Amino acid sequence: MKRPSRASSQPVKSEGHHASGQEPRKAPTRRASAADPQEQIDRLKHERDEAHEQQIATSEILDVISRSPTNLQPAFDAIVQNAARLCHASNASLYRIEANRLRHVANYGGVSIVKLGETRPITERSLSGKAVIGRKVIHIHDALAVADTELLDSREAIKREKIRTSLAIPLMRGDTLHGVMTLRRDVVRDFTDRQIGLLKDFAAQAVIAIENTRLLNELRQRTDDLSETLEQQTATSEVLKTISSSPGDLEPVFHAILENAVRICAARFGSLVLFEDDSYRRVALHNA
């Protein structure tokens, strides 16, 4: 008697079917939405437009700096205006360090902790003070929520103006601190990494403006000092020349001395008198 094969003793499943005879359930596949490509295109366009707008703002600020090398105010105003506009902040302010205090030198927007031109102390109890003391970016998710614990110096203004998300960027070049820029929103919405990067660029531009003005003022002062020194040397030479050419006559010498003194000191007129025999005698007069 022939023994049945082992292979034939097992039920055989047909390919693509369950043993129960039902069609197998296919694994769900994600059908690409027709909106996905459009969303990506819109996002890329938005990023492109945003980058272009930032480049234009940066170019405008550098142009203002180049056109006003000895006047910082136009540069500061352009920086805070573009910072608030591009980062969607309710307010942007710029402070400079003066004698261990912060002077408010530029502001854009309706919210302001300190009036323009006024100073405030540098402490850990304020947003700007934290950034200066820590020499780092300070990003507060909700200033109103921590006003009574972390921002005691500004809590009244924070509550009055309902200030929410806040950011401070120190103005630094190497180890030198020049000031701080602050931005505030009236809603709770954190600043993005892209926005913080842009604000760091604006802070660097503010430092460039400050350094350029300082260097130009120093150069101007040195030039003025050299010009003054040269003018004094020329005047001295003229007086000595007059003395040597008039060894027996003092009147030309007195007139040369007085004339050069009036010119160097930017005076309108001058008079030279001698004290003789308990009385004064005028010996030279210029422009009088």
Image: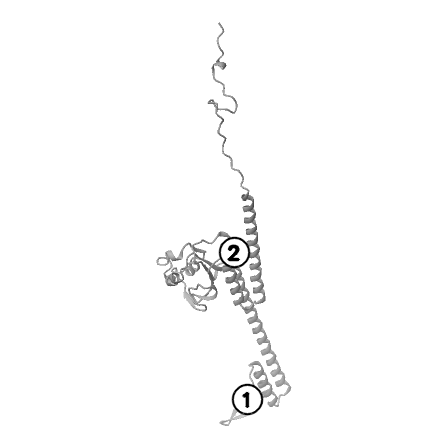
State the residue position of label 1: 272
Colour convention: one colour
Residue with the most extreme top position = 1
Q: Residue at x 58, y 72 (%)?
A: 223
Q: Residue at x 57, y 55 (%)?
A: 52
Front-most of 260 and 57? 57
Residue count near mark 1 (Cα–Cα under 10 Å), binned few <14, some 14–19, many ≥20: some
State the residue position of label 2: 198
Residue 52 visible in the displayed image: yes
Amino acid carrying mark 2 in the image: Leu
Cα separation between marks 2 and 1? 65 Å
Residue with the most extreme right position = 245
Q: Position of residue 176 (x, y in %)?
A: 48, 61
Q: Position of residue 102 (x, y in %)?
A: 44, 65
Q: Secondary structure at mark 2?
A: helix
Amino acid carrying mark 1 in the image: Leu
Residue 72 visible in the displayed image: no
Front-most of 88 and 201? 88
